[in-house]
Amino acid sequence: MKPNLNTKSENTWCPGCPNHMILESVKQTIVKLIQSGKHKQTDFAITTDIGCHAKIFDYLNLSGINCLHGRAIPTAIGIKMGNPNLKVLTFAGDGAVYAEGISHFIHAFKYNADMTLILHDNQSFSLTTGQPTPTSQRGYISKSAPLGVFDKPMNPIKLALASNATFIARTNARDVPHMVETFTKAIAHKGFSFVEVIQDCLIFNPDANNKDKQMYKIKTNTNKKIAEKLADEFDYNSKRGKISLGIIYQSKEPTPEKKWPQLSELLRSKKLWRDK
């Protein structure tokens, strides 16, 4: 039987919002993994942050925690430490991770917990009517920045590389097959997988939308120097740079399950702490 990941919750995303396609891609990815026979529906757990993206918590029939703003990553790490047998996915926005949660983002690469971060980046705090985020382009005018954003945006791909990331990927929210492919590889990676989804917001910051012509797909890259060049191609500030889609960088480093014998034993025996 095909796994049922649907819920009875009313979907309140804007009609046409790319979040609908991200949700469909996540469902297809998890269904495929379950139907492979290697995983059960109960093997997956999710955390979400605060924002439009976080409504996915109500639309996915999976266990998890809807977290405080900026705290979805450490909560997911806690879930993974509590039960290393789980496949943990975190959904968060560019405001939540790159602003309130920036310290957790950086340290997650250091810990290299075996989990996946799917980051919805529309370059605005859209749920709270479009305030600028750390990736908003210079000049973006909003209610909280009526004179426009004066500062250049941060480049999270470069920050991830500087933080010793073991898996960095980027995909397009309008490309369901590529999202499914990317999410599948991210979940399979042993370590902290960071997937940035370039997403338009139909209501706020429309000047950041329609970057599809800049996008091109790459093969999996394991060379850090090449990854740094790929990161430099797009500065989140203009529509002149190229935007690489795919696995920008991947490497192998030990996860907590390899570092801590207690976690290794739980993983080997497929037990919980309470079973010890």
Image (spheres, helix red, strand yellow):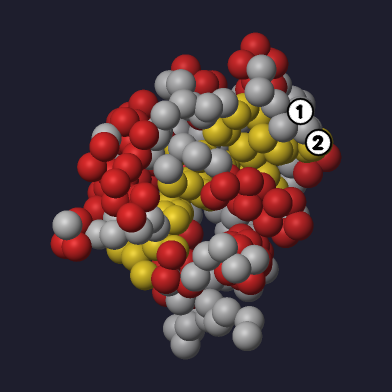
Q: Quadrant of residue 2?
A: bottom right
Task: Tell which tag, 2 or 1, sits nearer the viewer.
Answer: 2
Q: Is residue 41 above or below residue 249?
A: below
Q: Which residue is mark 2?
A: 216
Q: Is residue 255 above or below residue 43?
A: above
Q: Quadrant of residue 139?
A: top right
Measured in 3D between alpha carbons, the distance from the residue under mark 2 to the one under mark 1, in whole angstroms, is 7 Å
Q: Is residue 15 above or below residue 7?
A: above
The label on residue 94 is: none
Q: Amino acid at mark 1?
A: Lys
Q: Nearer the viewer, residue 90 or 155?
A: 90
Q: Is residue 78 above or below residue 146?
A: below
Q: Amino acid at mark 2?
A: Tyr
Q: Residue at x 64, y 39 (%)?
A: 170
Q: Nearer the viewer, residue 135 or 108?
A: 108
**Visible residue check, residue 75:** no
Local SS, label 2: strand
Q: Nearer the viewer, residue 251 or 272?
A: 272
Say few, some or many: other residues with alpha carbon within 10 Å of mark 1 (under 14 / 14 to 19 / 20 or more): some
